Amino acid sequence: MASSLPAAPASATRHFADDLRQRSDTALAALLRARPDLASPSPSTLRSLAARASSRTSLERALARSDALTLQVLEAVLALEPVFRAPPGPGTPGSGTLGPGTLGPEVVTRALGGAADDRAAVEAAVHLAVEHALLWDAGQTAGPASAPDLRTSPGLDELLGPNPAGLGPHIDPVPDGLAEAVAQALGPAPGPPGTGAALDALLAEAPGGARAILDALAWGPPVGVVPAAGTRPRDAVNWLVTAHLLVRSDARHVVLPRLVGLALRDGHTHRAPLTRAPEPQGRPVPRATADAEAASAALELVRRVRVLRGSWDENPPSVLRAGGLGVRDLRRLATQLETDEPAAAFVVEVAALAGLVRDDGDAPPSYVPTVSDWDDLDDAARWARLVEAWLASRRAPWLVGSRDDKGALRAPLSPDLHRPWVPRLRDSVLGVLAAARDGETVLAPTAAAVVEVLTWHTPRSVPPASAVEGLLAEVEWLGVTGAGALSAPGRALLPADPSRPADVAGALRAVLPHEVDEILLQGDLTGIVPGRPSRELARLLERAADVESRGAATTVRFSPASVTRALDQGETADGLLDELAHRSPVPVPQPLEYLVRDTARRHGAVRVGSASAYLRAADATVLAGLEHDPSLVGLGLVRLAPTVLAASVPAAALHEALRSRGLVSALEGPDGRVLVARRGVTGRAMPAPRSAAAIRMGSGSDVATRTPDPESLVAELRAVEEAARAGARARADAAEVAHSVAPASGIPLRGYRMVPGRPAGTGTAEEVTSGAALPSPTNGSRAAAAGAGTPAAPQDHGPEDDDPGTQHPADGLALLRDALRDGSTVIVEVAGHTGRLERRELKPLNLDGGRLRALDPDREAELTIAVHRIASVLPTSSTP
């Protein structure tokens, strides 16, 4: 068949593994960075890397990170690949195929329906897909000047479905003239007659409604239901089937062939290329307004964390049996923080992430504030510690209050809030907010607009709208956004931003209002702070006053309770009045002075202390000097009366200490009667408090596995390949020597069976007399062991597959799927009933349900093997 496309090079049949092997070290390192799952665990060889890159799990992860344009490119290549390269059917030479031809970026651009301006974006998407090993170029071996010939990676057709871009299967035969019309539409100079004219010629004698049926199936899905018999639509369908414009898949359905679908679309696989992400929609916010709102939210978060630490220091809440904070404690905290429960739960979470509160590890456990330098930092440094801890966390505080699969309510600090995908989604949301700019204003996008943009970036992994809404609420509470738009402190969290300040705290200091160190005292026992109070003034007001309102100015009120709180913390009446007078531009009002002095006069009139045990004696001389004895200072003895002493230790410890000093004491009960000692009675053992390191480590679920350096791994794989080549040459020499000394009848060497149909030195040898199991050296010695290709270990299974490292199960399964797809054979090592490994050359027939059904060509028999019994799978090709 004539085609306007150039012929494909002879290298179009090379394998995907050969493409990876011929890539440069820089390209392989870029592949490992783009798809880090390929390097964990480390692949043993480049062939193992190719098998893992084409495995279903790895391809699913790669597609989940691909944007809409990349997916369109993959669908276009997958849809056009069989059309360009499909072999002609018997009796129909050339019908149904446009090729052979080169499927390059220009063909993909035209197939996507893009104009000349879209070619740069499509070529960039093609380059990215090739870099990520989702596409590979079969035309590179023909020389640097050869035209690109794109192909999809093995296994990609299973993930993108049988109908890529809504096109049906490629079925022969195709009506005359249709393939030429599609080739003309995809060619370098599309023009008349075009696919429309070709279809009009084919449908010239079609019954009414035939074109409408084709148009209904044109853009997918390509499967239709056959109308009822005796109707005009049924007659039209029958005519289309006879004309090979439709194909019956069964008695009730018809399928639109791929070339017919392309002709109906004028050669396009998609209506238009999605070359650009949609612009986020939102309301414009002035930058000054966003920064001011963000600064206010940041200060409020710092204040709430400070209130949280003070509240839990006085009254630590209990830890639930399943972990987390109880509902009643959360409601009480929300009242103290003057906010709702979701915001209070976020304050608890971010304080725990920053290490400011934790479980004390006692029995029963409680949440307490930790000892840190938090109080010594300014507001900006405190905020920076909170926001940096939030940025690196994997927890989802917005799930607090929802129910899990068992119907249980999720609580703050619960272990059930851990989600490994949260950092990636958080970075994506911040990226969308950073892109929402409009000159001197910034946009405040809605949650729906953010989801729309994220859907373009990852169409196969769209985040739930509830997660996006939760993250937008968190960045508002943190002060990363102000009035819904990204602020200057929030922009400092983006490492790719060229205007990032030196530190995050400095970005907040630049937008914070100036501190004030004075308070205007008034006669009604109130005070007004005209701005943001300094640290010293804030501490004073926190101790001695209660906040009534906040805003541009803060209003506080002095009361007997607030003054008593200051006196409880060590203040005196004169000291408190002097400090207030020093910070007030007006004298201290007389009502406030009377309040402070009257409260101080009544403070401490009745004193309360604690004692765990007491001493009493009939004669005061017996207790003389005990409270001043240096050896008994640890007992905390205090004289209450001439014959009574109080102690701070339990009665049993006091009793033992007095007995050791020589005083014959006796234990008495509350009624004054002497207690009788009983054997076998012991106190309850208290658990030791957990260390800070143990609390940080937790259960170990957050400990990330360390992946190897891509450059080092590529160098190691190259060393393995070079050592494998050296071993292959050594084995070839040994096999040639063995062939020269072997009998002419072809009797194999002792202990090995030669595979029929293979020349000596290149076939697969299987040990049949030795009872020793095959060795499995570690990965660390793979390069050295691969080079040890001596006759003492004649394993003729290909130079690259002499890798002595332990094979990852995914690599073996991927090789089995490749062999199943290509109809080739592989070398399978199976653990026998005695535990010894048996090596066979098999042709896989089916892999399903954890079992492999394969054909043994040597024995001409089928066998079924459980997958868990397969130790390794090696390709039969001896070409590295």
Image (spheres, helix red, strand yellow):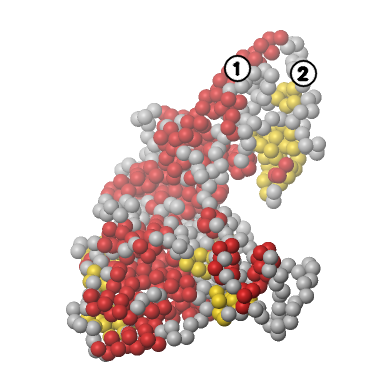
Image quadrant where residue 251 sits:
bottom right
Quarter occupied by the C terminus: top right
Residue furthest to the top: 741
Q: Position of residue 182 (x, y in %)?
A: 40, 47
Residue furthest to the front: 621
Q: Is residue 319 above or below residue 563?
A: above
Quarter occupied by the N terminus: top left
- Residue under label 1, please give it: 730
Residue occupying image coordinates x 76% and y 13% = 745
Q: What amino acid type is highlighted by mark number 2?
A: Arg
- Disc 2: CA contacts within 10 A as few (<14), some (14-19) or many (>=20): few
Residue occupying image coordinates x 41% and y 35% = 26
Q: Position of residue 474 (x, y in %)?
A: 40, 68
Q: Nearer the viewer, residue 424 or 299?
A: 299
In the image: residue 51, left or right of residue 209: right
Q: Nearer the viewer, residue 168 or 17?
A: 17
Q: What amino acid type is highlighted by mark number 1?
A: Ala
